[in-house]
Amino acid sequence: MSEIQNHALRAMFGYIDDQLDELDERVDRLEKSDRKVTDELSKVLAVVESGSETRKTVKKTIVTAVITGVVGYLLSQYGLK
């Protein structure tokens, strides 16, 4: 009976060891996938931030041009320009 128990225990431990190896491989794949997604998201975030800065710059330029035009018009109306 002891010999049968030893074989059964070895089989169970072998199965558990195989399952742990498979889970380790799965964790490795998930970590690689996570790194890839994180890298791609950081690139997307950089593009979004860049676009936001571009919009801010365009708005500032438009506002500056409008103010310059209004001030120039007022100065020309008062004969100061």
Image (cartoon, grey):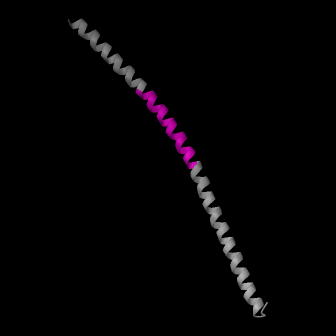
Residue 3, percent across and down? 24, 6
Find the magenta span and give its range: 23-42
Is residue 52 found inside the magenta-colored segment of the image? no
> Which corner quadrant holds the N terminus?
top left
Q: Is residue 46 left or right of residue 24?
A: right
Residue sitting at x 37%, y 21% = 17
> Which corner quadrant holds the C terminus?
bottom right
Q: Is residue 76 above or below residue 2?
A: below
Residue sitting at x 62%, y 53% = 47
Residue 67, percent across and down? 69, 80
Is residue 37 found inside the magenta-colored segment of the image? yes
Residue sitting at x 57%, y 52% = 45
Residue 2, percent across and down? 21, 7
Residue sitting at x 49%, y 32% = 29
Q: Is residue 19 above or below residue 39?
A: above
Q: Is residue 57 left or right of residue 33?
A: right
Q: Quadrant of residue 60?
A: bottom right
State the residue lying farthest toward the left.
Answer: 1
